[in-house]
């Protein structure tokens, strides 16, 4: 990826993770909500209640119709339960993407910095900035570790990954307005993912 093209997006992802962590610092000691730094992530990861969440940009080898890069925001979380059901999470994501739930999520987590975009276009406008196919863009992957996990003791991590592809029609708009991108990623991509993940790993 062209560093000049992705820098504003990566800076925005950094802002999102700082904001995400700050929300929990209102109730938890900072030692309980640590940043994690990994070389493949430009933005820090955040561990909350034992689960580590991350955001990063990935690029498809194929370009868009107009030659623009095809870039996604990858949202991820560690999975520790051997009986984790991907189908159950997919169902929870479908619920989280329903317009009524998107509105509720945005209303619950928005801040004054988001207000101009929501007032202008409404909370559902964030959804139109991304393309996400829950059949093809959601997966559970295995990643090798150099040292055993402090949680599982294994040398392999299971990581839940969901890609939100930036809508090619909105790419230029977002590249000119990183603040809009930051608001959309935080309130739509990250918060709906965390909501669905929490509902998946906790009892009904």
Image: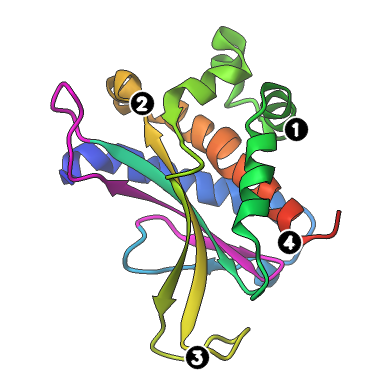
Q: Earlier in the sequence, mark 3 or mark 2?
A: 3
| Disc 3/disc 4 C-alpha distance (Å) | 23 Å
Alpha carbon separation for disc pair 2 and 4: 30 Å
Earlier sequence position, callout 3 versus callout 1: 1
Where residue 75 sits: x, y (%)? 49, 50
Direction from residue 165 to residue 27 in the image, left or right: right
Quadrant of residue 32 within the rendered picture: bottom right
Residue matched to label 2 = 167
Check disc 4 and report its element: helix, strand or loop. Answer: helix
Marker disc for residue 83: none
Residue at disc 1, secondary structure: helix
Tag 4 or tag 1, which sits nearer the N-term?
1
The region drawn magenta spans: 42-69
Viewer-side residue, 17 vs 26:
17
Front residue of this view, candidates 101 and 22: 101
| Residue marked by disc 4 | 201
x 44%, y 91%: residue: 147
> What's the CA distance linking mark 3 and mark 1?
37 Å
Q: Which residue is mark 3?
A: 148
Q: Which mark is residue 108?
A: 1
Tell whether position 176 is magenta.
no
Seen at 47% across and 56% down, the residue is 139
Give left or right: position of 173 versus 48.
Answer: left
Distance from disc 3 to disc 2, alpha carbons, whole Å, reads 38 Å
């Amino acid at each position: 990826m062209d560093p000049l093209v992705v820098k504003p997006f990566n800076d925005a992802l950094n802002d999102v993770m700082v904001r995400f962590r700050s929300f929990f610092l209102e109730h938890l000691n900072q030692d309980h909500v640590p940043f994690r730094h990994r070389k493949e992530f430009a933005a820090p990861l955040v561990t909350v209640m034992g689960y580590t969440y991350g955001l990063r940009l990935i690029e498809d080898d194929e370009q868009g119709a107009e030659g623009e890069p095809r870039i996604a925001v990858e949202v991820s979380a560690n999975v520790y339960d051997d009986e984790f059901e991907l189908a159950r999470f997919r169902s929870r994501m479908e619920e989280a993407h329903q317009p009524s739930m998107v509105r509720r999520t945005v209303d619950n987590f928005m801040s004054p910095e988001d207000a101009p975009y929501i007032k202008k276009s409404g909370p559902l406008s964030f959804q139109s900035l991304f393309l996400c196919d829950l059949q093809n863009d959601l997966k559970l992957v295995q990643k090798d570790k150099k040292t055993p996990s402090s949680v599982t003791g294994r040398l392999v991590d299971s990581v839940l990954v969901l890609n939100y592809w930036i809508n090619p029609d909105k790419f230029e708009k977002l590249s000119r307005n990183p603040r809009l991108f930051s608001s959309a990623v935080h309130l739509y991509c990250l918060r709906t993912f965390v909501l669905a993940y929490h509902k998946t790993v906790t009892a009904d």
